[in-house]
Image: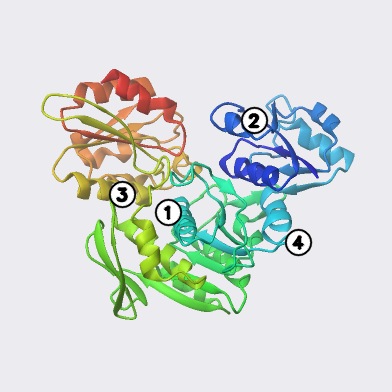
Amino acid sequence: MHIHILGICGTFMGGLAALAREAGHRVTGCDAGVYPPMSDQLRALGIELIEGFGADQLALKPDLFVIGNVVSRARTAEGQPKFPLMEAILESGLPYTSGPQWLSEHVLHASAQPRHVLAVAGTHGKTTTTSMLSWILEAAGLQPGFLVGGVPLNFGVSARLGASTAATPRPLFVIEADEYDTAFFDKRSKFVHYRPRTALLNNLEFDHADIFDDLKAIERQFHHLVRTVPASGRVVVNQDEASLQRVLNQGCWSAVEGFGLNPNAQWRIEGPPHDFGIFRSGRQVAELRWDITGVHNQLNALAAMVAAEHVGVPPEVAAHALESFQNVRRRMEVRGQVAREGGAITVYDDFAHHPTAIRTTLDGLRRKVGNARILAVFEPRSNTMKLGTMKSQLPWSLEQADLAICHSGGLDWDAGEALQSMGDRAQVARTVDEAIQQVKLTARPGDHILCMSNGGFGNIHARLLQAL
């Protein structure tokens, strides 16, 4: 079929477009920000891209319009629709669907070749854990398909269809299962559409304050996911999370495998993040030595191994695969170093945007660099952070940083006041240029500069390296 994707340059929709093209469909799409690298990736696949959401795109006459979550019925101050193409689709009565629904019906559960879906859900670590699980299955020779909200460095692409093998006549497909809502016309979480046989519940905290009233509302959506897992399936759950226990207490009809730091967890880890044992029911079943930092990544790895075991990959095989795991672009990615007498200054890029993610990322870096200075440069850019819902947690999240510089542009709350308890260990910059200047004046040989944002952050990484 010919599908036309509205909002094609988002990470999820771009991955969906690549899958559709690989499956043999004709794909076109539009977005308000058609620029590299996503535009280059899509055009290289033979996908025609159009800038904007003009109603004239009806002339393409696709079989189906696939609507991204960026699209809404919003209007400008002058009363004009922000997405005239969507208004034209509705007026004309043309067929449309959401990205997750199209993916479910035409890829994950297509009648010609239904797949065994392994869905990775959680407030934190979805992209990394999805990438780990995909790499474990790949290294085991199972040729999984996957859709990741980032670019796993082991694969170099964010999505592929995968294939069946002698061991997996039903092809495996690993998907990052997001709890954010599906589309303006479908307010269920995206992951409700995926109907996994293996559901991984990695952790659960309050987030997305723009669409959820409280943690209980998110727990309800997670339980909707649990309801879709068949009796022969597996729910892999973090036993350290009370919120996930409340989810399961609402009802679970599948086998449950628990993991965590708790000594009583079914699957647990023992040892430091770079070299640790994996235990199942008190017996060591594998050991993992690698270069990935942080306790959170130990847990991500453990979760991925438990999910992989459900489709026949032994823990020792999974651990061996993870020894060669290269992480994901924008996850503690070293963007460059500046040589200085007394030690190079290293600049990192990380996607952390929730206080817990900021804290765990900094903790991982601290364990790696010891007493060296860490400068944390961050922007509260997610919808939740922009609302100021979690501003009181910022000092806690930044405890491991020697200096924190907050980019306050676009915030409706006072970042200086939120960080006041940190004293002279915190600074506020109204612009990216100001943040760069503050780093330039402060940086010393041997420093580690960690830039954290879920956006482009004004290309601060390259500009910092140049300024230094």
Secondary structure of residue under mark 1: loop
Q: Earlier in the sequence, mark 2 or mark 1?
A: 2
Q: Which mark is residue 125?
A: 1
Q: How many marks?
A: 4
Q: Earlier in the sequence, mark 1 or mark 3?
A: 1
Residue 204 image position (x, y, % from top left): 45, 61
Q: Residue at x 43, y 52 (%)?
A: 128
Work out how far the residue at label 4 is from the one at label 2, CA to CA, in angstroms.
28 Å
Residue topped by disc 2: 43
Depth check, mark 1 against mark 3: the one in front is: 1
Residue type beneath disc 4: Ala
Tag 3–tag 2 contact (CB < 8 Å):
no
Residue topped by disc 4: 112
Work out how far the residue at label 3 is from the one at label 4, CA to CA, in angstroms.
45 Å
- The answer to whether residue 298 is seen in the rendering is yes
Work out how far the residue at label 1 is from the one at label 4, CA to CA, in angstroms.
32 Å
Q: Earlier in the sequence, mark 4 or mark 2?
A: 2
Q: Residue at x 44, y 67 (%)?
A: 243
Secondary structure of residue under mark 4: loop
Secondary structure of residue under mark 2: helix
Q: Residues within 10 Å of mark 4 (few under 14, many from 20)?
A: few
Q: Earlier in the sequence, mark 1 or mark 4?
A: 4
Residue type beneath disc 3: Arg
Residue 103 image position (x, y, % from top left): 68, 53
Q: Residue at x 35, y 61 (%)?
A: 320
Q: Which mark is residue 359?
A: 3
